[in-house]
Amino acid sequence: MRVYIGCAGYTNDDWAENGLIYAGVRKDEYLTAYAAHFDAVELNSSFYGIPGLKAFEGMARKSGNRVRFSVKLHKVFTHDRAPTDDDFDRMLQSPEPLRDAGVMGPYLAQFPYSFHRTAENRRYLARLTERFAGHELAVELRHGGWDRPEVRDGMRELGVIWVSPDYPPVGGMPEPQVHVTGDVGYLRLHGRNKGNWWDGQSASERHDYRYTRDEMDEWAEKIALVQGDLSELYVFFANTTKGHALLNIPMLRAALNARGIPVQAPDPLDAPEPRLL
């Protein structure tokens, strides 16, 4: 099993503080600096506006073709749920430079908690997955009503990746387990900031949480249980606030290596010399 580990997004200005990886790095060099430390990233900007071909070409170039990109679907697919044919065409065609460079990971469809398991929503999800047939599609379903074996069985039949999450213990959301619906696994670690999950004024407040070493050991144990079932596993940390993810990723790497799952940090090569705490 090849494990790719990275962050949800890479354009985090608070990582420019002293001791973090963007200290002394120009904004247009953030991705190059990021690629010196991590081999995967979730692209958040595509949720707000689908980048064009040139933008994706620039991402591949600045990352040195060394980072796997998971491209988040635009909100028109998951929150508005009214995509046009043009939206599908742009979402499917624009990342072509990543495919040409061999660094395209799964698409990510991140549905909100309000997307309950109703007949209408099940039909919409079936239509969406049909349009992305032939491409790896990971689906995060935040309402606990979807957290059922029969849902994952259906996703397995459709070739869709179930996103295994780690949420704060607030109830009503999927349990923190690694579930396998194909050769590729996908894990998103949101942190466990219970107090701010519903009441936080921003995503940065909700994800203001640093995992402990014991919590990383717990996830390493869960990953070890499914390593024989997967060819690839993507692990993304969403707790990017204050650089929490930058410290948690080395913890998880060490915990996986200790369990015989080889994970290495990228070779910095000619990248700038950003620092971790």
Image: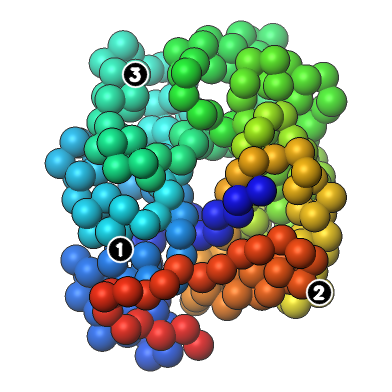
Residue pointed to by mark 3: 88
Looking at the image, do the residues carrying marks 2 and 3 touch, with CB atoms under 8 Å apart?
no
Q: Quadrant of residue 185?
A: top right
Placement of 262 over or under 80, stated as above or below:
below
The mark that comes first in sequence, 2 or 3, is 3
Mark whose residue sits in front, 1 or 3: 1
Residue count near mark 2 (Cα–Cα under 10 Å), binned few <14, some 14–19, many ≥20: few
- Numbered circle sitting on residue 214: 2
Q: Secondary structure at mark 3?
A: helix
Q: Is residue 31 left or right of residue 43?
A: left
Q: Residue at x 79, y 66 (%)?
A: 259
Residue pointed to by mark 1: 31
Q: Residue at x 75, y 48 (%)?
A: 227
Question: Residue 110 appears at what percent x and percent y?
Answer: 54, 37
**How far apart are the alpha carbons under marks 1 and 3?**
27 Å
Q: Is residue 133 left or right of residue 58?
A: right
Q: Quadrant of residue 175?
A: top right
Residue count near mark 1 (Cα–Cα under 10 Å), binned few <14, some 14–19, many ≥20: many
Amino acid under disc 1: Leu
Q: Secondary structure at mark 2?
A: helix
**How far apart are the alpha carbons under marks 1 and 2?**
30 Å
